[in-house]
Amino acid sequence: MSDGSRTVDKVKTLLKPFKDSDLQQTIKLYDSLAETYDQDLDMLTYRAPHLAVDFLDVNFPGVREKVQILEVACGSGLVAKLMAELGFRHFVGVDCSKRMLDQAAKTGLYQDLRQALLGPEPLPAQTGVFDVVIGVGALDAGFAPVSVVRDLCHTARPGGMVCMVRGDHRGAASEGYREDLQRELQLMEDKWLWRPALKQSPR
């Protein structure tokens, strides 16, 4: 049930990441937010899901109806709903929160939904099979470790697309995470594990 007393400041406080040592608290947080999560994001005018899907809309060259998609940190299913509007049909979702997965299941869009805490637990997905791997908002201190990006790339088929969008997180921990992430992505590029897309969404 939606809480009419929620304000933007309250929601921002609720969505503030925990320290890495408090990842179980992160699960409890998202369990508690599951039923009002989409409304909370609307309140914050959170654009990351839309930016990710806009980028795919511009840059993905394949036949969308046949594409196999792995969505990590799928939450309530907002990204899948946006992608379905563009013709994507086949989704596997992973999230740490059982209640979020319950909300995602209600969309009817996912062929499979799996619970896992990114980083401490193995990513429950086959390697080298997904045409698109997408994750929105999970790459920051207190959510998922930088090492997760290699796991995401390993699940993509050769030539597949990995789309990762970070929120606009502030503070020393987030800044350190951003630097570590850039370093990791550069190392992966140097080893030909991935290459960044050359095109950018115009929106």
Image: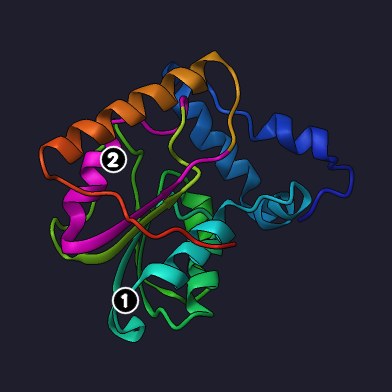
Q: Where is residue 134 in the image (x, y as percent from the top left)?
A: 38, 56
Determine the residue positioned at 28% across, 40% down.
149
Query: Which residue is under mark 1?
Result: 61
In this view, the residue in front, 128 or 201, is 201
Q: How crowded is mark 1: few (under 14 residues within 10 Å), some or many (20 or more)?
A: few
Magenta extent: 141-167
Q: Residue 149 carries which label?
A: 2
Q: How many labels does the image show?
A: 2
| Point 21% across, 40% down: residue | 150
Q: What residue type is labelled 1?
A: Pro
The residue lying toward the viewer, choosing from 146 and 17, is: 146
The magenta stretch spans residue 147: yes
The picture quadrant where one finds residue 157 is bottom left
91 shown above or below 179: below
From the top left corner, tell me how far across and down residue 202 is, in percent. Answer: 55, 62
Q: Which residue is drawn at 69% across and 33% down?
A: 14
Looking at the figure, which quarter contains the C terminus? bottom right
Q: Indicate which label's residue lies in the foreground, 1 or 2.
A: 1
Determine crowd level at label 2: few under 14, some 14-19, many 20+ residues with C-alpha closer than 10 A. some
- Tell me the distance, in whole angstroms, between the alpha carbons under discs 1 and 2: 22 Å
Relative placement, left or right, of 39 versus 150 is right
Residues tagged 1 and 2 counted as in contact (Cβ below 8 A): no
Q: Residue furthest top?
A: 172
Front residue of this view, candidates 39 and 101 = 39
Residue 142 locus on image (x, y percent)? 47, 26
Nearer the observer, 115 or 64:
64
With respect to residue 87, does 139 lie above or below? above
Can residue 122 be seen? no
Q: Give how far across and how far down residue 1 sits, in percent.
A: 76, 56
The structure residue drawn at horizontal position 14% and vertical position 45%, both measured from the top left corner, is: 193
User: Left or right: where does residue 128 sit relative to residue 163?
Assistant: left
